Amino acid sequence: MLDCRIHKVRHAYDVAVEIVAGAERLALFGPSGSGKSTVLSCLAGLETPDDGHIHYDGQTWFPPPLALHQRSIGYLSQHEALFPHLSVAENVQFSLDAAARSDERSWINEIRERLELGALWHTRPDHLSGGQARRVALARTLCRRPRLVLLDEPFAGLDRPLVRELAAILKDWQERLRFTLLAVDHDPLVLEGLCPRVIALEQGRVVQRGDWAELARAPATPTLRELLDMRP
Amino acid sequence: MPKDLPRTAALAATALFLLYPLWGLASPVGRWRWAAAGAGPALATSFALTGVALVIVVAVGTPLAFFLRGAARGVRIAFEAAVLLSVLMPPLALGLLLALAFGPGTAVGELLLRLGVPASNDPAAFVVTQVYASLGYYLLGAAAAFEAVPRTLEQSAALLGLRPRAVLWRVTLPLARLGLAAAVSLAWVRALGEFGAIMVTAYYPHGIPVQLWVDLQDSGLPAVLPLLLVFLLSALPLPWALRILARSRGYA
């Protein structure tokens, strides 16, 4: 269970957001600069909140800030950050030691098959296309079975069929592994396909919570209405 | 015209320019003579003591260069200024200053004397001088190598559950290795070829540069050139091998 209240001082406006989430898929939605990525960065430990608290399953992540490696987080952004000196196989299994690789053999095989990485398994990242690199990054993120998965526009720049496929895989694994998934994207279609519940942000504040149907029926602000109207 | 020809031609021309001084080895200076009495010990002195100096430089310089990356801006600027000052020092001036600073007129010199460590004409003086001559070069190269490692990759590794030490071993060092190899090569070449400072602080035991000077004075060029050739051939493999090893997995 994620329980956080994040207050982060920004130049233009402060970000102040409260989130409580269990083993579910939750979208953070809002216009550019509304503070969505700041929330994810604070949860991941890449930024430190100025005030508030972050707890996950009874463990305190802030305050004081818990080191990144102790948080059991899967963080996926549009920058794959694959390790260029390692093969796809080594990237995917990076977080596992030799014993864990042996124990998790069937899970690793499932990831490899489902994300179609078999033919790329011994390839270096500099030989991968954008879509392939994103699959590898997703595989690496999920390989260690994180408790909290943070997606910061991970599908940006990918074509629709691939986005739908990756979102379906993520949904499936989230339901099986029961991790908390928080997703940020500028595209409501991507989020709607992935997350049933949504928190809408504007200028660092939560303006609405609910499911997508509620949001579409009565958007809390004109900006939110405009963003939702952009859907086909 | 092949697409790669201009680049190859430019690289070849530069390599020829850099290697042209070696043409001097073919000069008609008379029959070469191997000055066996001094050459063997000089080779042993140079390689053994430079090896010791290099180990010290790498052991001290690598963590320093790594920590420099995370240092406050002011600390970093001040430290880099100190390093640059040591690098800019003319070798002869460095030797003179070392002789004065570690001489009997200073507290450090007195302490060394009391401990029975000679401040000149001794293997310890030889190694210390080499360390002074090469540490700054290594630090600048190693710091640049660490700086070139993307922070996002280290953050990714930490988010994947790696402790800071594991991140260093599995991400930072492998990604910095080509730059570190270049820094080690530079330090090795700088220490091994040091002449001006060594002349002042450690004329004895003769290393190769001093032996070349002695042979030139005593026997002329026919005695210098064979030792020079052996010196070049034996000094090259280490930096060359380091570069090749560092490139072996194809990432800079």
Image: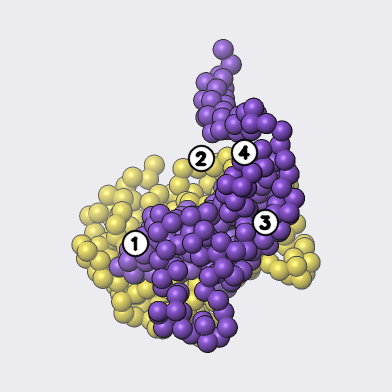
Between disc 2 and disc 4, the foreground one is 4
The crowd level at tag 2 (other Cα within 10 Å; few <14, some 14-19, many 20+) is few
Visible in this render: residue A45?
A: yes
**Amino acid on which disc 1 is placed:** Ala
Circles 3 and 4 in contact, beta carbons < 8 Å: no
Q: Position of residue B109 (x, y in %)?
A: 46, 79
Residue bearing mark 3 = B42
Residue bearing mark 2 = A159
Who is closer to the viewer here, B240 or B228? B228
Q: Are marks 4 and 1 on the same chain?
A: yes
Chain identifier matching the purple colour in the rendered picture? B
Q: Residue at x 45, y 62 (%)?
A: B95
Real-space CA distance between mark 4 and mark 1, rounded to the nearest whole angstrom: 41 Å
Task: Give me the disc on residue B81.
Answer: 1
Between disc 2 and disc 3, the foreground one is 3
The crowd level at tag 1 (other Cα within 10 Å; few <14, some 14-19, many 20+) is few
Question: Considering the image in quadrants, where does the N terminus of chain B appear?
Answer: top right
Real-space CA distance between mark 2 and mark 1, rounded to the nearest whole angstrom: 51 Å
Real-space CA distance between mark 2 and mark 3, rounded to the nearest whole angstrom: 67 Å
Q: Residue at x 66, y 38 (%)?
A: B222
Q: Residue at x 48, y 68 (%)?
A: B64
Residue bearing mark 4 = B221
Q: Quadrant of residue A33?
A: bottom left
Q: Is residue B231 left or right of residue A202?
A: right
- The kind of secondary structure element at disc 4 is helix
- Chain A drawn in what color? yellow
In the image, residue A199 sits, relative to residue A88, either above or below, namely below
Real-space CA distance between mark 1 and mark 3, rounded to the nearest whole angstrom: 35 Å
In the image, residue B49 sits, relative to residue B8, either above or below, namely below
Disc with the residue nearer the chain's start (1 vs 3)? 3
Which residue of the protein is positioned furthest toward the front in this rendering? B218
